[in-house]
Image: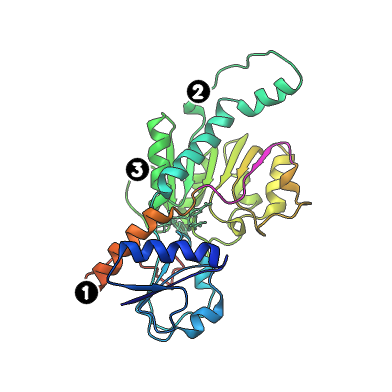
Amino acid sequence: MKIVCCFGAGPAETGPWVTELAAAMPVAQVSADALDADYAVVWRAPQAFFDRQTRLKAIFAAGAGVDALLAMRLPAGVPVIRLEDAGMGEQMAEYVVHAVLHHVRRFDAYAVLQAGRTWRPLPPQRKADWPVGILGLGVLGRAVAQALRALGFPVSGWTRTPRGEPGVHAGEAGLAPFLANTRILVDMLPLTPQTHDLIDARVFAQLKTPAYFINVARGDHVVEADLLAALDTGVLAGATLDVCRNEPARPDHPFWSHPNIVLTPHVAAMTLRHESVAQIVQKIEALERGAAVDGVVRPERGY
Ligand code: NAP
Ligand code: GLV
């Protein structure tokens, strides 16, 4: 069996995946250049890579979101399988908990006071007054929901498919009641035609105010001018953004210098090679036995 790895960042990133997959799966021939591979492991691979592969049985994405991969011309009928958690759930929970506490425990306000050498305790805040709403309650959204609930925050979620669980709203009809009960909005959706530009002035206006916005998903979900306007008018008290529409953000992007924005360079949950290789190997072995695997992307729904 042949496995080919291709990471758009180049040989320095592809090489360690080849080495680690080969060590974890001695029966396979793993390389960066096979043209007749059975399985491909990719992240931001160029179109020419897919055009050359003629006998793939499956394409493994080395990430959770597959929007960029689905935008390529992929070999017809070949399933795309994405990472499910693989160590990202814990990282997402840490990142979002940090952002929520940073605002609710007023570390942002105390940073301003410290800059002015002002020793002024601010009134305590009740978690009950900071309901968190998570857009997208999938593998990673559920890990974040669990961590926030464990800290005592009221948490609700929004999904595409109705679940019949308390606090989980679904579909277009479920968005308004979900937003009306949310003060901290956390974006954990995949990027699909339905979620592109979803988060705009209309969405911010429906939140309990002053609200707080955390985006750990994709920048293309957000109408950035509307986000900046919501901050300027006080609808939003602040935002923590791990992503933006055009990455990397240009030096003159307003997010860099906005006093109420925390910006990080798409690092909320990074792909962990060891955990990912273990998951991919387990799935290849299952496929070779003819067994079904989880994490198969449904192209018609975009995730
Ligand atoms: P997932 O398991 O596929 O979950 C996606 C969730 O979004 C599901 O609950 C799904 O609803 C919901 N959803 C999708 N389309 C929707 C729509 N139109 N309306 C309402 N809900 C919708 O994905 P995941 O593994 O949790 O990952 C989520 C996203 O996180 C990825 O796609 C990626 O964009 C982002 N991510 C970012 C980073 C980072 O470092 N910033 C790292 C990893 C992932 P159903 O439950 O009904 O299917
Ligand atoms: C990173 O953004 C991912 O989707 O894994």
| Residue under the image location 28 percent in, 62 percent down | 282
Q: CA distance from mark 2 to mark 3?
A: 22 Å
| Residue under the image location 50 percent in, 72 percent down | 70
| Residue under the image location 53 percent in, 30 percent down | 101
Tell me which numbered mark, 1 or 3, is placed earlier along the sequence.
3
For label 1, the SS is loop
What kind of secondary structure does the magenta stretch mostly adopt?
loop
For label 3, the SS is loop
Image spot of residue 105 (x, y percent): 56, 25
Q: Quadrant of the C terminus?
A: bottom left
Q: Residues within 10 Å of mark 3 (few under 14, many from 20)?
A: few
Q: What's the amino acid at mark 3?
A: Pro
| Residue 197 forms part of the magenta stretch | no
Image spot of residue 286 (x, y percent): 24, 68
Q: Nearer the viewer, residue 86 or 1?
A: 1
Q: Which residues are magenta?
A: 258-268
| Residue under the image location 57 percent in, 65 percent down | 9
> What residue did someone put label 2 on?
126
Q: Is residue 120 left or right of residue 273?
A: right
* Mark closer to the observer (1, 3): 1
Give the number of callouts: 3
Q: Which mark is residue 290?
A: 1
| Residue 265 forms part of the magenta stretch | yes
Q: Is residue 46 above or below residue 247?
A: below
